[in-house]
Image (spheres, coloured by chain):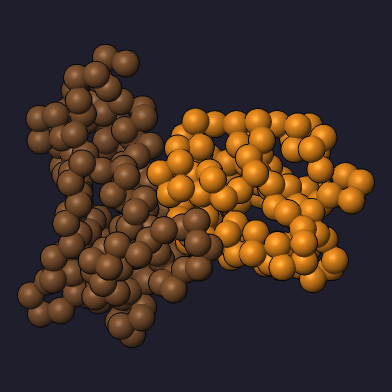
Chain colours: A brown, B orange
Amino acid sequence: MIDPDVAIEIPPKPEYVALVRHVVGAAARMGGLSPDLVDNVKLAVSEAATNAVTMTRRADSEEKIEVRAEIEGDRLLVQVTDRGSHEEALRTLESGDTDPSSLDFSFERGLSLPLIQGLVDEFVIEPREGGGSIVRMTIIESEAEATA
Amino acid sequence: MNLDLETSTHGTTSVVTLRGEIDVYTAPRLRQALIDLVSGGATDIVVDMDKVDFLDSTGLGVLVGGLKRVKSNDGDLKLVITQDRIMKIFDITGLSKVFPIHGSLDEALRTA
C-alpha cells in the first residue's frame, strides 16, 4: 500500500474534468479506499472541478485549476483551487434553497452542492487570497466501510 | 472518455440508451437529444442508464430539464436504473422522488 500525494493542473475546460476524476479516483483506489468510497470521491471531485471550470470561465479567466489529493491515514484530502468566484455557490449553501423536488433551479449548478455534501465527510469553500477560491473536501474510510 | 447515445422507438415511447460517462463535457449531447425528441413530437421518453458508468449533477440537470419539457406536453420521462452507484445519486439529491424509476427497460415500457 502506498499513500498517494498527487497534484494536477488543468485548463478551465469541460473536457478536462474527466482527467481530474480518473486521476483522483486512481489515487483513492491506490490509497486503499473501498470501491463505494472511490465512487464517492470521483463524483465529489468531478463536481468540485466542474464548479471551478464554470466559475473560472464566468470570471473570463484562463487561469489553470489546481487539484491536489492526498491520503492521510484513514482519510483522503482533496483540494481544488481556482481563480473563479464561488460567491454564488456560497449564497446557495447559506440560503439552504437547494430542494430539487421543486423542479425550479434558479442556480444552474444548484444540484452540485447538496450532492457534494451527501458524498464527503467535510466540505469547506474558502476565498483565496488574490481572488478565486479553495474547496477542501475530506473523505474518511470508516471501519465498517473498510470491512464491508 | 465518451458517451454513446442511441435513440429508438417502442410503440409510442421513445427510448434513449446511454453508455459511458455523463458529465459537464458529454451532457450537452444528451440535452440536445432530449430537445430533438420533444420537438419531434415525443411525449413519453425512457432514458435507459443500465450502461452508464458515471453521472454527475450536470447530467441530473439535463434529465430534470427533459422531464420539465415532456411534462409541459402531458408526457412523462422515465428512467431505467440498474446500478446502486447511480441510484445513490438520485437518492442523495431527492430526485428519486421526482422521476419514475424502473429496474429494467421491459418494466418501464410495460407501465407506459
- A123 and B23: which one is in front? A123
Vertical side of A28 occupied by B10: above or below: below
Q: Residue at x 65, y 44 (%)?
A: B100
- A8 and A131: which one is in front? A131
Quick one: which residue is furthest to the bottom in this view?
Answer: A60
Q: Residue at x 27, y 22 (%)?
A: A145
Residue B90 in picture, x, y percent from top left: 49, 44
Q: The C terminus of chain A appears in which quarter of the rendering?
A: top left
Residue A16 located left or right of residue A131: right
Residue A134 in picture, x, y percent from top left: 17, 64
Q: Where on the picture, by quarter, is residue A17? A: bottom left
Q: Residue at x 24, y 19 (%)?
A: A144
Vertical side of A124 occupied by A51: above or below: below
Report the number of numbered marks. Answer: 0
Question: Does residue B40 appear in this view?
Answer: yes
Residue A16 in picture, x, y percent from top left: 40, 60
Residue A58 in picture, x, y percent from top left: 36, 81
Vertical side of B16 occupied by A143: above or below: above
- A61 and A136: which one is in front? A136
Q: Residue at x 10, y 30 (%)?
A: A73
Question: Does residue A50 appear in this view?
Answer: no
Vertical side of B99 occupied by A28: above or below: above
Q: Where on the picture, by quarter, is residue A27? A: top left
- B103 and B56: which one is in front? B103
Q: The N terminus of chain A appears in which quarter of the rendering?
A: top left
